[in-house]
Image (cartoon, grey):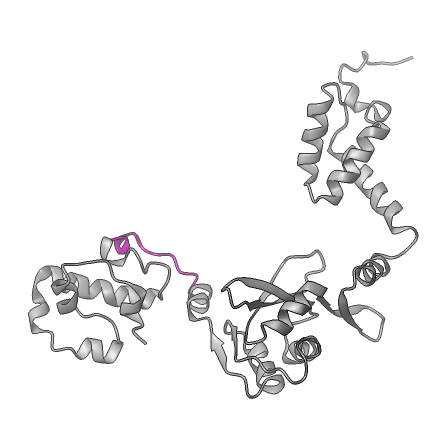
Amino acid sequence: MHNHPPSKDLSGHPSHRRFTKEEFVRIQEMTISGITPKQILSSLRQGNGNLKSISRSEYNARAKFRKESLQGRTVLEALFEELGEADFIFDVQHDHDGHLTHLFIAHPASIALTKNYSSFFLMDCTYKTNKYGMPLLNIGGVTSFNSTFFSAFVFLRKEETSDYIWALKRFVKVLGMQRHPAAIVTDRELALMNALKIIFPDTPHLLCEIKTQLSHEKIRIPHKFHIPLLCHINGRVSLYALKELFKQYELAVSDVSSICKGNFTNSMDLPRAHKIKTTNFQPLQLIDIHPH
């Protein structure tokens, strides 16, 4: 005996939210392909207009699939087994409690490219890319065709010099002990810079100044700087440089630039008002800011 009328929405009943075997197989295939849960459910509803399943049903199906695919293994055991089967080069480090603290991964094709094009590498850490909150060090290279490739990935416990030293030592093994890069580019990550001095003492280290300026200043270009003169360098130079250039632009417009004697250019290495005016206010190029 019920004290409420029959339910009009069958999706409220778990028995009506179950997927068919065919739908479960499709969920598996789309999960492996990296399709998001929301897109998976939308695709299933397009194929079955009477589908009563909800987001929780799909998440449960995905969880069941992951559990079955592990076959009793832990996530790390499954990862290491798959890396080995695919001939990845990888190395790990654990703490005293057995928790993974560092993981180095390099694909066979990446290793071949690293050995063939070992002159120039870029290194940078990305954040919040995994649920464990571990920084991910990306190491990339450049081919003779001016195309880039990923050389290796390293999950780190922290961003301390010792963590980067561990990663770079593994990278040296992939690169080859006799190979020394002609240059390595990073942002202003001091711990990584210190580690590079230790592991690659003879390799020149270059700073990606544009990325450094933008990341540290979190630059937001004021509306007044959106003028034709600065259109090609907005977002590519520091906010300080933009302010100084705008001052010179105002001088050129007001015709006060006649008193300029070149001291500004000599001290700031930026185009002065006189030059801006003589070029008829043509848009500045990056080479005008950094002629060397």
- Quarter of the image with the C terminus is bottom left
Q: Is residue 8 left or right of residue 243?
A: right
Above or below — where is 32 with respect to 195? above
- Quarter of the image with the N terminus is top right
Q: Is residue 215 left or right of residue 80?
A: left
Query: In this rendering, does residue 107 appear at all?
Result: no
Residue 123 counted in the magenta span:
no
Above or below — where is 288 with respect to 61? below
**Rendering coords of residue 117 (x, y %):** 58, 72
Dominant secondary structure of the residues highlighted in magenta in the image: loop
Residue 218 counted in the magenta span:
yes
Look at the image and give the residue range highlighted in magenta: 217-227
Query: In this rendering, does residue 16 appear at all?
Result: yes
> Which residue sits at x=74%, y=22%?
48
**Rendering coords of residue 164 (x, y %):** 65, 76
Quick one: 85 or 67, which is closer to the camera?
Answer: 85
* Quadrant position of residue 177: bottom right
Instruction: Please count the marks in the image.
Output: 0
**Rendering coords of residue 51 (x, y %):** 76, 22
Quick one: 139 or 250, which is closer to the camera?
Answer: 139
> Which residue sits at x=23%, y=62%?
246
Q: Is residue 193 left or right of residue 22?
A: left
Quick one: 53 or 152, which is closer to the camera?
Answer: 152
* Quadrant position of residue 137: bottom right
> Which residue sits at x=82%, y=14%?
4
> Which residue sits at x=19%, y=58%?
282
**Rendering coords of residue 157 (x, y %):** 70, 70
